[in-house]
Image: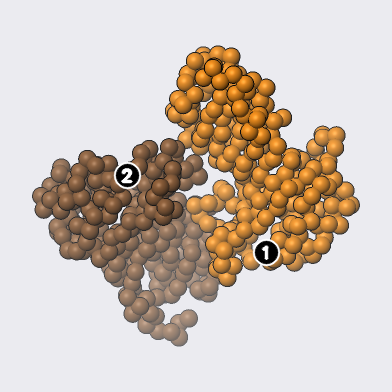
Chain colours: A brown, B orange
């Protein structure tokens, strides 16, 4: 048996999220169907974490065990031939047997994108939350500083979450405008959050609250007081899923290293 | 009556082209349905030219006559409320009664986009022709020089064209890489062609032939000999429609000026 790790990008628009469901219309279902056709094995893939319906991925990571003898450099192309056009495997490697795409992950980055302008950007309408008026990005940047560090994120977590602890660490939070010239008629605001882990809807609730900061409905200081309240009702709305992309998942190099190179 | 001119962008993926057809699934049909709901009038729009199924537009220009008294600054938003999300009116102005979006046009720019890389760009897969290997963009740039000027473009015109003359003038032709660093693993090649007018499939046949130049199957000099042959069979294949975007249509300022400003 080998443990194969893959990086998977997808446009989430057409799918009911990542994780398998009775509807079968999930990214995981399509990956497993492709693996069945490729290897003849019924394979269950493990991911770094589920993504909701409409949420995209640039760098989702999965792993699975297989007895198939296909050389590692052939997996990407073989999988992409069998997958729909909106799911792309962009990398594959053989990893240590104990590697687990969720448990071995040390940090994860999400990006949330907001389009400000008179009109949505037609060609990115599935990838951006559309906001018709300008937002105060300086205030949003200041607000974002308050989420960095180790906090109880109960206020920024869906009440449907079942996690025992809502304490998480955000290592880095940044806001970038594209193009950088904020005087333009139409621009995208990208919010990047990198952390040890994320609670259910956490990035979308932070984004929804920051939009209110950008609108002047809340101060940037409010982010701190919302955190302290540990009460979901104090934060802003959950921003729409289609602005969210799972950007990157990082691992210790050790976790990725093959225990037995002679298997290659 | 007023003559209203609009700039219309659309993602052509879901449509059977711009021009109205019995299927009713065209951009023109949706524009005319929106105008009917907005004004109560059965309005026929004139465009700068049709685009084929799957072809996109950033700057299609239309005009139409109406008795509706809606102030000009309200038209964009009102139309966008009534149009599907993949058609956006990005500008509207009242123009001289004799303005005609096709006959008054003095130049038009098309863009053809090719993605080179190990994988298609997932989020631009409807907007780019995907080519799995690198292309020699220097040779393509050289080949492109030969189409600039006034030529008989019979070799680069679909045999289904019914135009009396195949002589057209290309004012400008350029090739840009995005990002500009050609050593990258994945990059887009944008070919921009600006001319007095274009024959049926002309940009797509030029793009299809230039791709062969980029592959080394033809020399850049071949573009000149193909032009001279005046024979469609000498040129390369017609590149897929989804790489093509009607980029911009230009008019003399005079043509756009209102004859009677008191109408505003």
Residue nearer the viewer, B251 or A146: B251
Q: Position of residue B46 (x, y in %)?
A: 65, 26
Q: Which of label 2 and label 1 is nearer to you? A: 2
B160 shown above or below A26: above
Question: Looking at the image, which residue is at 57% across and 41% down?
Answer: B58
Give the residue drawn at x 81%, y 47%. B150
Which one is nearer the viewer's eye here, B239 or A260? B239
Say which residue label 1 marks: B137
Q: Which mark is residue A135?
A: 2
Question: Which x, y percent locates residue A251?
Answer: 33, 72
Give the letter of the chain under mark 1: B
Classify mark 1: residues with Cα within 10 Å, few (<14), some (14-19) or many (20+). Answer: some
For the N terminus of chain B, which image quadrant?
A: top right
Give SS at disc 1.
Answer: helix
Q: Nearer the viewer, residue B144 or A69?
A: B144
Question: Which of these two is toward me, A56 or B144?
Answer: B144
Q: Is residue A57 left or right of residue A223?
A: right
Expressed as whole percent of the image width and height from the top left, the position of residue A149 reads 19, 64
Q: Chain of mark 2?
A: A
Q: Is residue A264 above or below residue A81?
A: below
Name the spot of residue A166 as percent of width and height, x first.
16, 57
Q: Is residue A200 visible?
A: no
Secondary structure of the residue carrying numbered label 2:
loop
**Numbered circles on residues, count:** 2
- Residue farthest bottom in this picture: A262
Q: Is residue B102 left or right of residue A158?
A: right
Looking at this view, name the residue that lies furthest to the left. Answer: A229
Q: Does label 1 lie on the same chain as label 2?
A: no
The CA span between labels 2 and 1 is 40 Å
Q: Residue at x 52, y 33 (%)?
A: B91
Q: Which label number is shown at residue B217?
A: none
Q: Is residue B238 left or right of residue B230?
A: left
């Amino acid at each position: 048996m080998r443990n194969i790790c893959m990086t998977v990008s997808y446009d989430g628009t057409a799918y009911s999220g990542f994780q398998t469901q009775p509807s079968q219309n999930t990214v995981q279902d399509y990956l497993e169907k492709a693996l069945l056709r490729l290897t003849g094995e019924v394979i269950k893939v493990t991911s770094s974490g589920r993504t909701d319906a409409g949420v995209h991925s640039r760098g989702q990571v999965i792993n699975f065990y297989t007895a198939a003898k296909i050389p590692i450099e052939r997996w990407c192309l073989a999988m992409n031939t069998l997958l729909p056009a909106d799911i792309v495997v962009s990398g594959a490697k053989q990893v240590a047997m104990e590697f687990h795409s969720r448990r071995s992950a040390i940090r994860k980055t999400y990006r949330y994108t907001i389009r400000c302008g008179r009109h949505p950007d037609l060609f990115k309408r599935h990838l951006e939350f559309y906001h018709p008026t300008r937002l105060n990005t300086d205030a949003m940047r200041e607000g974002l500083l308050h989420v960095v560090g180790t906090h109880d994120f109960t206020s920024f977590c869906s009440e449907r979450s079942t996690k025992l602890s809502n304490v998480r660490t955000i290592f880095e939070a940044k806001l970038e405008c594209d193009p950088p010239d904020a005087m333009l008629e139409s621009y995208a605001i990208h919010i990047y959050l990198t952390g040890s882990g994320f609670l259910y809807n956490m990035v979308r609730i932070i984004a929804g609250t920051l939009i209110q900061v950008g609108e002047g409905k809340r101060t940037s200081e409010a982010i701190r007081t919302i955190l302290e309240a540990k009460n979901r009702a104090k934060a802003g709305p959950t921003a729409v899923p289609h602005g969210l992309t799972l950007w990157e998942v990082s691992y210790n190099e050790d976790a990725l290293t093959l225990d037995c190179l002679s298997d290659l």
